[in-house]
Amino acid sequence: MIIRKRAAAVITVFFCAGLFLVWILSNWVADLAKERLQQDANDELRSQVLLAKSKLESALFRDVFLVDSLATLFNIDPQASGENFYEISIRLLERAENVRNVGMAPNDIVEKNYPVEGNEKAIGLDFRTVPSQYETVQAARQAQDIFLAGPLELVQGGRALIARVPVFTDYPANENYWGSLSVVIDYNNLMSSAGLSSIENAEIAIRGRDATGRDGEVFEGAPETFANADYQGPVVVPNGEWWIAADFKDSLTKEQENLLQLGRWSLIGIYILLFFSVCMLWVFYRAERHRANEDFLTGLSNRRFALSYLNRLMSEGNDRNRFCVLTIDLNDFKAINDTHGHDTGDDMLKLVARGLETAVRASDIVARMGGDEFLVILNRCKDKEQADKIIDKIRAQVERQHIQAHGLILYPSLSIGCACNSEGGQDKATLLKLADERMYENKLSIKKKQS
């Protein structure tokens, strides 16, 4: 029982240690798989951002180049272009995707707007009286090229980019300034058509108002997105650039999360199944081995095990490993069998077996050699004097027990012979022969006393 409890404790410790390691391994594998899935998702999001950025640049340049063609007409003939402003603007808006309205401002004073409806209040506006707008008009004049201002909030609602286009009557010298054209581009529609506003699982931010680049003001999204960005890059605009940042969020699907959990618990389940399968095989092996080395009647070790164990002891040498063997014979056992039957004889053998196991130490080996013969191997027994004390204990324990048969009380009587390897026995046969001789001497002595 002590061995079984110890084995169970060892198995429990190994199981818990293995379970802990498998738990760590399963979490590591799951985290690795999650990281790989998230990386794949991030790559997909990066592709979406790059595609949307490309669409944004393409749409913006397309509309701005249409505006530039309008400027070319005014550079060639400002008067004729002004007279046909509405017709030209209608054609422009038909071809443009995101242009909301167009205005012309000779001498930087707004003279015409298209569409007219909703823009009546702007007619007559002198840009010089509105510093924030005049600054962008002047920037276009000085650059002698389109200047993209904004995005900015419109009074009538929404956000827009304003393309300021300078007009010179002496192109390409560009010394005679006629005025400017202003084209309002719908910012919200531009972003939506590019797809930036519809990207899921990503925080998008853009900075560089008035095309001032990565050091400019943030006009889309949160500033902290730039600190946590998984992707950053330029958006090329006509007179400079914007700077875009994307912070990708965890975007695993519910199915992917469930698969990761299933994988984690599957590893643990496989470990438990394998562990207990190995344990069962080990238990079956131990049981079969035990049965092969066990006496079926008494439950003691059998002759094969005892002799094998004795061989191992003899092979280890006598100097450090001291032991003694006791050969034990049950006196008058044949008479018990003949008089009371084999069942009574079996009961007597079981009684003696239990008594022997009780009397010796846990480290000693008790075996039934066959019939009424027993062998006790006393491990760590240094001499015959110590063995004699154990023999006295065996007699006291065994011979005071009894069984009942047909109304009679039967007590066992033992003949015991002892031999120690310290006496010079060089092999198993010599040692057992010496013990047998002393056992028969003890048997004769008992018979003489009884007679």
Image: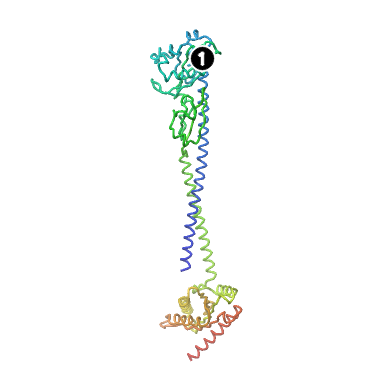
In terms of depth relative to the viewer, which is nearer, 350 or 79?
A: 79
User: Pointer 1: residues within 10 angstroms few (<14), some, or many (20+)?
Assistant: many
Q: Position of residue 152 (x, y in %)?
A: 42, 23
Of all residues, the one furthest to the right in this rendering is 426
Which residue is at 60% across, 74% downward?
Answer: 315
Q: Is residue 322 left or right of residue 254?
A: right
Q: Position of residue 381 (x, y in %)?
A: 52, 78
Which residue is at 50% across, 40% downward?
Answer: 38
Which residue is at 58% across, 76% downward?
Answer: 319
Disc 1 secondary structure class: helix
In terms of depth relative to the viewer, which is nearer, 21 or 237?
A: 237
Tag 1 residue: 71
Q: Position of residue 154 (x, y in %)?
A: 40, 21
Q: Say if 141 sits above or below 449 in the image.
A: above
Q: Amino acid at mark 1?
A: Ala
Of all residues, the one furthest to the bottom in this rendering is 451
Q: Position of residue 221 (x, y in %)?
A: 43, 31
Q: Say if 323 sits above or below 175 in the image.
A: below
How many circles with numbers are drawn on the protein? 1
